Image: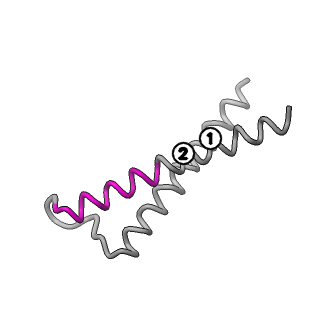
Amino acid sequence: MFAQLLKQGLFDAAGFLVGTALGYGLGQLLSIDLFAPGYSFMSLLGIALIGIGGGMGLQASRYFLQKEKSTDA
C-alpha cells in the first residue's frame, strides 16, 4: 500500500515538473517574459502557461499510471 502511494506521488510530482518546464519553454519560445516587472499581460500569460502545463503534466502522469495499472491486472 505504501509503495503504491509513493509511486503515485512520485509520478504526480514528475508529471507536474515536466509540464511546468514545457509550459515555461513554450513561453520562452513565444518570447513571453515571465519575470517582467509588474503584472503585464505577457507576464500573466507566462504564469498561465506554466500553470496549464503543470496541470496537463499531472493529468498525463495519472493517465499513464492508470493505464499501467489496468494492464497489470
Q: Which residue is mark 1?
A: 62
- Kind of residue at disc 1: Arg
Position of 52 relative to 31 (above/below): above
Q: Give the position of the C terminus as an image quadrant.
A: top right
Magenta highlight: main SS: helix
Q: Which residues are magenta?
A: 40-54
Residue farthest along the top direction in this orientation: 1
Whether residues under marks 2 and 1 lie with C-beta atoms below 8 angstroms apart, the answer is: yes
Give the SS element for disc 2. helix
Is 42 inside the magenta-drawn segment?
yes
Residue 19 at x, y = what percent? 50, 55
Residue farthest along the right direction in this orientation: 73
Tell me the crowding category of disc 2: few under 14, some 14 to 19, or many 20 or more residues within 10 angstroms, Cα based: many
For image coordinates 16% across by 65% down, the residue present is 37
For image coordinates 24% across by 62% down, the residue present is 43
Position of 8 relative to 23 (above/below): above
* Displayed quadrant of residue 10: top right
Pick the front one: 49 or 15: 49
Q: Relative to residue 46, is residue 41 drawn left or right?
A: left
Residue 45 at x, y = what percent? 28, 60
Q: Which residue is mark 2?
A: 58
- Kind of residue at disc 2: Leu
